[in-house]
Amino acid sequence: MSNRIVKLPSVESFGRLTPDKWLLLKTLEEAAEMVEAGKQYLKASDPTDPSGIGREFDDHANCLACFGVNVGGELGDDRDRAKVGWIGYVRGQRRQAMLGELADVLQTVGNLIAAFGITDEEVAQAMDDCLERNRERGRL
């Protein structure tokens, strides 16, 4: 994957905007939640299915069959299509959860910037400095 410039939308700060340890920890908490949601999405996207989405579908389909509901037969194409659809649905749900957590992280960062009185220019300079450090380290 090549480098790209990511355009972030404007973030309106709100809520508790006190420059303190609580706000810093809130940012860490939101980042941890984003990591966990991202891990769940990655597991759901792995073809070896480590999160068990396919097994989960089979369990549900078998349970429904116990009550007389047919999900495409035991080895039928309909069941295979339903399983593929289910896996895609779960992956989509987990991606949306990850994006929701990412938005929470951006929100708390915006709140932190506002609370600590950091200007847009300071953020821009800090990003330029970060880019330069990464160039010097050979990451770009």
Image: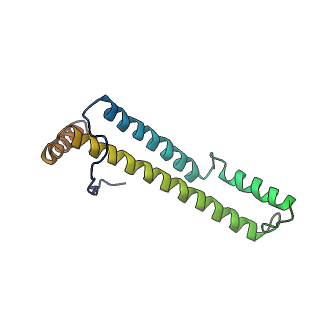
Q: Position of residue 126 (x, y in %)?
A: 18, 41
Q: Is residue 10 left or right of residue 83?
A: left
Farthest top residue?
Answer: 21
Instruction: Tell which of 110 and 46 is nearer to you.
Output: 110
Colouring of the image: rainbow
Of residues 110 and 76, the one drawn nearer to the viewer in this rendering = 110
Picture residue at 34% right of the left edge, 31% below the top: 22
Quadrant location, the C terminus: top left
For residue 95, above or below residue 77: above
Which residue is rendered at x = 33% and y = 43% of the image?
A: 108
Please state the horizontal and vertical placement of residue 100, each as a whole percent of the image. 44, 52
Residue at figure coordinates x 18%, y 44% from the top left? 123
Q: Nearer the viewer, residue 81 or 90?
A: 90
Give the image location of residue 99, x and y in percent: 43, 53
Query: In the figure, is residue 113 to the left or right of 27?
Result: left
Give the residue at x 17% y 44%. Answer: 128
Quarter placement of the N terminus = bottom left
Name the foreground residue: 42 vs 107. 107
